């Protein structure tokens, strides 16, 4: 049986809080492997040297980036480009589609998701005139909600929220508004022209973007969201549960409780990669998991 792959977290202190890059092969934070047989190698090196662990995917780089984001203050209002725009305008970088799972939040917490502009011209006028309260859509959230943030979606995480972020392996962000904050005595850079080029108008409906928390189903794979970049589902293990790893790779985040995965003890706060062809996963204990996978199987070499 292949080993589960554990990594060292890359911690990023931010003006508004912190990000823990828990599964990352991004050049701005390439996690080192903790497993003894690959100790000291980065995830990107393991991806290149041991492609069989990841289903021999025909992709130059590890495609996902997993973060835990702790927002003590508001993040900037921002947007991410899609792959096509990034390919043409950002030296071939991938774009950034992402999704969030709310791990914890204060009472009456909300996010910014989308906008109220009906046309590109109206969007530009509202941004240029600073009509922020009229522009942004505020969406109340609670623990357990799942939010889909596609490329082109204007958005922001507000203070008092901790969430798990699953995204494309990209760090491209275009800031639209940053509350006039200073970093090292200067305002942070805004990217208004690029943002206007990529923001979707009209915005997607909130119903399309948010999967509301409900009663957790025990010992079942509950699909939260899926597209060509990721598949995310929640599993609440109650005593015993068996699941088969059928993807090129799977990332498991333990968000509550503790227990066993086969002969390995796992607990809240751990994140690890289940490699290709791992076989059956036998969970025991009481815990809640968020499982993230790269869904495209057609690109696996036979």
Image (cartoon, rainbow, N blue to C red):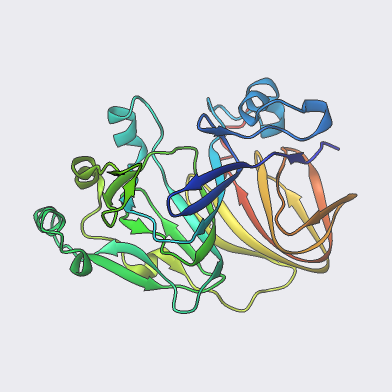
User: Residue 30 appears in which quarter of the rendering?
Assistant: top right
Q: Is residue 21 above or below residue 266?
A: above
Left or right: 259 with respect to 172?
right
User: Residue 131 appears in which quarter of the rendering?
Assistant: bottom left
**Residue 302 seen in the figure:** no
Left or right: 29 with respect to 193?
right
Q: Where in the figure is residue 146, as x and y percent of width and height?
A: 51, 64
Q: Quadrant of the C terminus?
A: top right
Which residue appears at 73% of the width and 26% of the height?
40
Left or right: 152 with respect to 165?
left
Residue farthest to the right? 263
Q: Nearer the viewer, residue 13 or 51?
A: 13
Residue farthest to the top? 49
Q: Nearer the viewer, residue 245 or 263?
A: 263
Q: Quadrant of the N terminus?
A: top right
Q: Where in the figure is residue 12, as x and y percent of width and height?
A: 53, 43
Which residue appears at 42% of the width and 47% of the height?
97
Q: Where in the figure is residue 223, as x and y percent of width and height?
A: 58, 62
Left or right: 42 with respect to 139?
right
User: Residue 197 appears in which quarter of the rendering?
Assistant: top left
**Residue 233 seen in the figure:** yes
Q: Where in the figure is residue 152, as x and y percent of width and height?
A: 30, 49
Q: Nearer the viewer, residue 68 or 101?
A: 68
Q: Is residue 135 above or below residue 172?
A: below
- Total number of numbered discs in the rendering: 0
């Amino acid at each position: 049986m292949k080993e589960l792959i554990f990594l060292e977290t890359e911690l990023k202190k931010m003006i508004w809080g912190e990000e823990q890059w828990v599964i990352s092969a991004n050049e701005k934070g390439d996690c080192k492997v903790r497993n003894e047989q690959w100790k000291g190698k980065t995830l990107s090196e393991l991806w290149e040297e041991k492609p069989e662990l990841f289903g021999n995917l025909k992709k130059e780089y590890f495609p996902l980036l997993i973060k835990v984001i702790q927002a003590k203050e508001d993040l900037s209002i921002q947007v991410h480009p899609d792959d096509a725009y990034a390919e043409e305008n950002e030296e071939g970088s991938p774009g950034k589609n992402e999704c969030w799972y709310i791990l914890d939040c204060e009472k009456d917490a909300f996010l910014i998701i989308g906008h109220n502009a009906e046309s590109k011209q109206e969007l530009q006028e509202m941004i240029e005139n600073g009509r922020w309260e009229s522009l942004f859509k505020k969406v109340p959230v609670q623990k357990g909600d799942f939010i889909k943030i596609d490329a082109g979606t204007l958005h922001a995480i507000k203070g008092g929220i901790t969430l798990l972020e699953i995204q494309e392996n990209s760090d491209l962000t275009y800031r639209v508004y940053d509350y006039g904050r200073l970093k090292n005595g200067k305002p942070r850079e805004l990217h208004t022209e690029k943002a206007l080029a990529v923001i979707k108008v009209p915005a997607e409906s909130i119903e399309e973007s948010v999967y509301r928390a409900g009663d957790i189903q025990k010992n079942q794979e509950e699909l939260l969201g899926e597209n060509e970049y990721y598949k995310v589902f929640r599993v609440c293990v109650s005593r015993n549960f068996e699941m088969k790893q059928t993807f090129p790779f799977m990332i498991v985040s333990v968000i509550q409780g503790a227990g066993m995965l086969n002969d390995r003890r796992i607990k809240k706060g751990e994140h690890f990669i289940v490699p290709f062809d791992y076989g059956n996963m036998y969970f025991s204990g009481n815990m809640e998991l968020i499982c993230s996978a790269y869904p495209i199987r057609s690109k696996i070499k036979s």
